[in-house]
């Protein structure tokens, strides 16, 4: 890979806990090209969100570091927009105002008032939220909140878009629609995307590469799968595609044979239920 | 549609079924029963207590004193009006005889009535409470935002928080006397003393609750702020203040309650005009009516305290972004 855009080198992190340091990640090495779409997949609690938070600059790696465009990342910034695992909208602002906060911050000097308004509305339209843009987060469904969160991140026109299970809380139809628009948007804007997902189909459909993580503690990258499918991709056509199904089954094999969760379900303390996770990124 | 039909429909829809009656009974009847029982117990209990100033006043006597206090207020108002009218006539006459005559305008020397004292007390308590809020909220925000500030100020807060107003008062009095020296003071010393005492006592709940509210802001929202690199002021305005409003108001309500309680004590001791002084003067007066008048004051103090709390509650539900939140 010649033109490395974002580089994670030897990234490791340990969290201080009452029982001594807990080493969540060790030796994560990854080079990402500009405009590449990378998915992170792995079992719950393995450290996917932690990787994303380190790239976002919200966590500081204990060892190693992240370099974006030749500069080390050590604090968060709007050029690395985050779609949080649990939407994280400000509950006292409407959907519109939530996006506005980000847009004002990023384009405050570059755009006029009307341009900003159009831009905000355009982004809410992308995620099909125009009809409810003046509602507060409490008044809309979980999936709608997640969509506003995506609109907020997209509206920042980030170089790198970091998404933590962005479609996890959505119904299948909305999810498919948003996946398609994400592909379109990404093809158009060409920004780099790192997306965490639990959904194998989603990973294969959207990604250029799938990064599969081993189970924690001391999680690291297990395998990297290049998805060499032509774009634009069409989900219906791909359903019968042999390559597609091969990719799919190799991810499944990784997850359910090589990285099988050994402990019984009841003994999993570190892994919260997926949907309404009491997020680890917190605290 | 025919308006009469509309009205009829509305009427029918609003008709009272058994459920509505039950709801009404719950909302109105139960508190009424409590009130009637209380008055009954008071009435009977008062008869059993003989004080040096006569029998302890029952509901009837207190009601009578309430009427007296009202008539006193009205007659004082009339006296004042009459005084100014006389003065005006006198001066007008003087000027008529000699346009260059020197006329004197004097202020009426009003004897403060019960209701004047209430107003004075309210002004004092509001001043103290306002001062305390102005200090406590910014400080609370700083404490909540920074662990260092918290660690620095926590011991001081913990030590001063439980101090009774009675302990502060002598110190405040001495300091005010020493510092606030002016030939023609705009504000009475006793007023300043009461205000400062109130402020010192009601500072803490607002400060502590604001700090707790600020410190417990959702980490995800803070992450949003960090990713956007919001400026300090925007961060405070869009993230910190809205999320700590509920806790802030819990503190404000506690503070106002304390302020009102402290004020009465401070007025008694500092001899600052107000309800506290009214009670104290009546107590010193020791006439057969005094106990009844003090009872009126006690009830009034309670009632005003209740109204103050309601007022804050109203402001809270108005300011709070979460309109669905139940505030009580
Ligand atoms: N701030 C923290 N302090 C201590 N331990 C943490 C912290 N954040 C994460 N961890 C631990 O690090 C590990 C990885 O957590 P992480 O949230 O990255 O998992 P994840 O792969 O995103 O899981 P999920 O798919 O359920 O979201 C977990 O065992 C978690 O308990
Ligand atoms: Mg996660």
Image (cartoon, rainbow, N blue to C red):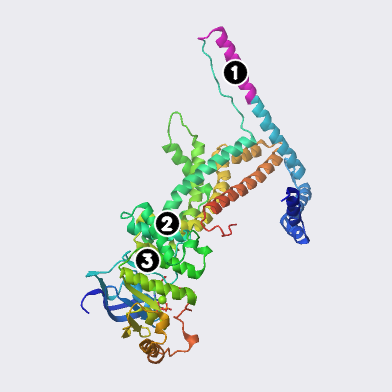
Image disc number at residue B238:
2
Please, what secondary structure does the residue beneath circle 2 have? helix
- Label 2, ligand 1: CB separation under 8 Å: no
Tell me what residue is drawn at x 72 percent, y 37 percent.
B67
> CA gap, disc 3 to disc 2?
21 Å
Residue found at the very far left of the displayed protein: A2
Dominant secondary structure, magenta: helix
| Lateral position of residue B12 relative to residue A64, left or right | right
Mark nearer the viewer, 3 or 2? 3
Element type at mark 1: helix
Task: Tell me which chain the residue with mark 2 is part of.
Answer: B
Few, some or many C-alpha atoms within 10 Å of disc 1 (few <14, some 14-19, many ≥20)? some
Picture quarter containing residue A67?
A: bottom left
Is label 3 in a helix, a strand or a loop? helix
Is residue B83 covered in magenta? yes
* Residue B40 visible, this orientation: yes
Image: magenta residue range: B80-100
Quick one: quadrant of the N terminus of chain A? bottom left
Q: Tag 3: Cα neighbours inside 10 Å, few (<14), some, or many (≥20)?
A: many
Which residue bears the numbered disc 1? B87
At x 43%, y 67%, the residue is: A127
Q: From the viewer's perspective, is the residue at label 3 or at label 1 nearer?
A: 3
Residue A99 x, y percent position in the rendering: 41, 61
Q: Which residue in the protein does label 3 denote?
A: A154
| Residue A17 horizontal/vertical position (percent) | 39, 76
Asked if both marks, 3 and 2, belong to the same chain, the answer given is no
* Label ID, residue B222: none
Quarter containing the C terminus of chain A: bottom left
Nearest the camera: B209 or A236? A236
Q: As displayed, is residue A149 above or below residue B66? A: below
Q: Residue at x 50, y 86 (%)?
A: A266
**B259 lies left or right of B18:** left
């Amino acid at each position: 890979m010649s033109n490395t855009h974002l580089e994670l080198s030897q990234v490791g992190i340990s969290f201080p806990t009452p029982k001594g340091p807990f080493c969540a990640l060790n030796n994560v090495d990854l080079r990402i090209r500009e405009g590449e779409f990378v998915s992170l997949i792995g079992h719950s609690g393995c450290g996917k969100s932690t990787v994303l938070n380190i790239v976002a600059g919200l966590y500081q790696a204990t060892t190693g570091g992240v370099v974006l465009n030749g500069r080390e990342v050590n604090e968060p910034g709007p050029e690395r927009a985050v779609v949080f695992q649990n939407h994280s909208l400000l509950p006292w602002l409407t959907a519109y105002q939530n996006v506005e906060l980000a847009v004002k911050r990023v384009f405050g000097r570059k755009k006029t008032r009307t341009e900003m308004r159009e831009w905000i509305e355009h982004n809410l339209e992308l995620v099909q939220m125009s009809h409810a843009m003046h509602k507060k987060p409490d008044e809309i469904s979980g999936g709608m909140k997640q969509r506003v969160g995506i609109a907020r991140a997209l509206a920042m026109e980030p170089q790198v878009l970091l998404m933590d299970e962005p479609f996890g809380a959505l119904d299948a139809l909305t999810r498919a629609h948003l996946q398609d628009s994400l592909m379109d948007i990404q093809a158009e804007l060409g920004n780099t995307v790192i997306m965490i997902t639990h959904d194998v189909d989603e990973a294969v459909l959207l990604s250029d590469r799938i990064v599969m993580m081993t189970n924690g503690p001391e999680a690291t990258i297990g395998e990297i799968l290049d998805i060499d499918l032509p774009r634009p991709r069409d989900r219906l056509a791909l359903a019968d595609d042999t390559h597609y199904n091969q990719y799919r089954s190799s991810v499944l094999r990784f997850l359910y044979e090589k990285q099988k969760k050994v402990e019984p379900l009841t003994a999993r303390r570190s892994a919260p239920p997926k949907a309404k996770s009491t997020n680890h990124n917190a605290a | 549609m025919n308006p009469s039909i509309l009205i009829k429909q509305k009427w029918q829809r609003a008709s009272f079924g058994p459920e509505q009656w039950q709801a009404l009974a719950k909302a109105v009847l139960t508190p009424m029963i409590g009130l009637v029982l209380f008055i009954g117990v008071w009435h009977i209990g008062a008869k059993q207590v003989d004080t040096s100033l006569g029998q302890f006043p029952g509901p009837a006597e207190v009601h009578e004193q309430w009427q007296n206090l009202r008539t006193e207020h009205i007659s004082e108002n009339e006296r004042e009006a009459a005084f100014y009218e006389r003065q005006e006539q006198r001066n007008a006459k003087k000027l008529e005889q000699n346009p260059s005559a020197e006329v004197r305008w004097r202020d009426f020397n009003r004897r403060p009535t019960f209701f004047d004292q209430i107003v004075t007390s309210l002004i004092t308590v509001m001043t103290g409470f306002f001062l305390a809020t102005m200090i406590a909220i910014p400080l609370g925000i700083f404490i909540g935002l920074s662990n260092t500030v918290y660690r620095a100020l926590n011991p001081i807060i913990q030590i001063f928080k439980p101090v009774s107003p009675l302990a502060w008062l002598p110190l405040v009095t001495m300091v005010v006397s020493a510092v606030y020296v002016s030939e023609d003071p705009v504000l009475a010393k006793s007023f300043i003393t009461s205000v400062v005492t109130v402020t010192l006592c009601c500072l803490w709940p607002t400060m502590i609750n604001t700090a707790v509210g600020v410190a417990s802001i959702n980490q995800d929202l803070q992450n949003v702020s960090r990713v956007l690199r919001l400026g300090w002021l925007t961060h405070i305005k869009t993230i910190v203040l809205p999320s700590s409003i509920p806790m802030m108001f819990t503190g404000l309500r506690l503070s106002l309650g304390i302020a009102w309680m402290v004020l009465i004590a401070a007025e008694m001791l500092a001899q600052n005009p107000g309800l506290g002084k009214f009670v104290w003067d009546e107590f010193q007066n020791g006439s057969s009516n005094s106990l009844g008048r003090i009872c009126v004051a006690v009830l009034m103090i309670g009632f005003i305290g209740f109204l103050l709390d309601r007022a804050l509650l109203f402001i809270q539900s108005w300011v709070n972004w979460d309109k669905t939140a139940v505030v009580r």
